[in-house]
Amino acid sequence: MAGTQPLRLKTISEFHQFRGLPKPEHPLVSVINLEDVNELPSGEMSMVKDFYSIALKRNFNIKMKYGQQEYDFDEGTMFFMAPGQVLRLEVDVVTTLKQSGWMLLFHPDFLWNTPLAKNIKQYEYFDYSVNEALFLSEKEETIIAGIMQNIQQEYHSNIDKFSQDIIIAQVVLLLNYSDRFYHRQFITRKIANHQVLDRLENILAHYFKNDALATQGLPTVAYIADALNVSPGYLSGLLKTLTGQSTQQHIHNTLIEKAKEKLSTTALSVSEIAYGLGFEHPQSFSKLFKTKTNLSPLEFRASFN
């Protein structure tokens, strides 16, 4: 409900209690069979978890919202949440969930003193919106479910000095497979993804054509993503797969084309062009131009005379 504070779940034990599950066997990591999860009360609620959550869900008959986006899980789908993100759930009536699948929960403290504590930041899909979830094939579902069950089996066993390393290795394997599957999704959903690319080019062309640069500066990655109704991380991952370049590189490429046009068709000074393109310092413009073209702005202009 609007204005209400989200429910904050600080520990995995609190999550288990909230969802009517037995106390977790390990305080910092848990694998949950979603068929065991109890029904939710009707209405709307927001939730914040202080731990990582990776869910493989099928037939999840509850609407979920993240930001302004809504998604209804009715097929095999993966969704990733990092600590501190707000998720809103909408349940029309008290209902017994028909969902199946698996959920992996792990607390940041479990990663302490391991390379993953730092490296987990490189997996951008934790910042993707709900509507940018990962859709899995049957074969991919089997792989992910198998890894989650391996993690569960490990902490079911007697915990020893090897347990953390083995579980962390399985988590890394799951994250890397998820990365692979996202790249596959970027490629297999070509029509929709190339439409995003076309819209990106149109947004940049419109922004540069209207000379918004002089007053507003270069468009930010967040501005472009918002105009495309996607998250910045998802847009960057998509563009890197389709074009090999990040959103920032696309912005710079459009900027350089505009700069080339002004250098070759006007008598404006380099400083005037730089200010007109939204740069506070002409030196910054000249440095970027040379990085992209191997020529200074003046050398580029001289090549046309």
Image: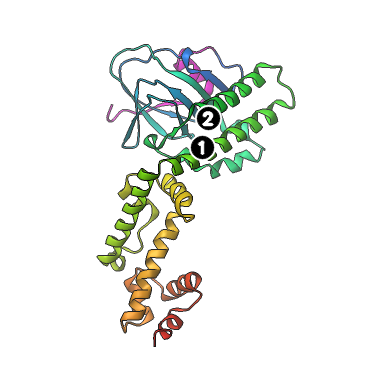
Q: Is residue 214 left or right of residue 157?
A: left
Which quarter of the figure is the C terminus placed in? bottom left
Residue 29 in sight: no
In the picture of the structure, the residue carrying the numbered disc 1 is 181
Relative height, residue 221 to residue 58 (above, below): below
Residue that lies at the very extreme toward the right in this rendered image: 161
- Quarter holding residue 99: top left
Identify the secondary structure beneath mark 1.
helix
Residue 265 in the image, given as x and y percentages of width and height: 31, 80
Q: Nearer the viewer, residue 3 or 157?
A: 157
Q: Residue at x 58, y 32 (%)?
A: 174
Q: Amino acid at mark 2?
A: Glu
Q: Is 7 covered by the magenta stretch?
A: yes
Magenta segment boundaries in residue numbering: 1-22
Identify the secondary structure beneath mark 2.
helix
Q: Amino acid at mark 1?
A: Phe
Q: CA distance from mark 2 to mark 1?
A: 8 Å
Q: Nearer the viewer, residue 219 or 194?
A: 194
Relative height, residue 226 to residue 285 (above, below): above
Q: Is 218 covered by the magenta stretch?
A: no
In the picture of the structure, the residue carrying the numbered disc 2 is 140
Residue that lies at the very extreme toward the left in this rendered image: 210
Q: Is residue 134 left or right of residue 63?
A: right
The tag earlier along the polypeptide, 2 or 1, is 2
Q: Nearer the viewer, residue 296 or 162?
A: 296
Residue 8 in the image, given as x and y percentages of width and height: 43, 27
Q: Are marks 2 and 1 in contact (CB under 8 Å)?
A: yes
Residue 170 in the image, given as x and y percentages of width and height: 63, 30
Q: Nearer the viewer, residue 10 or 61?
A: 61
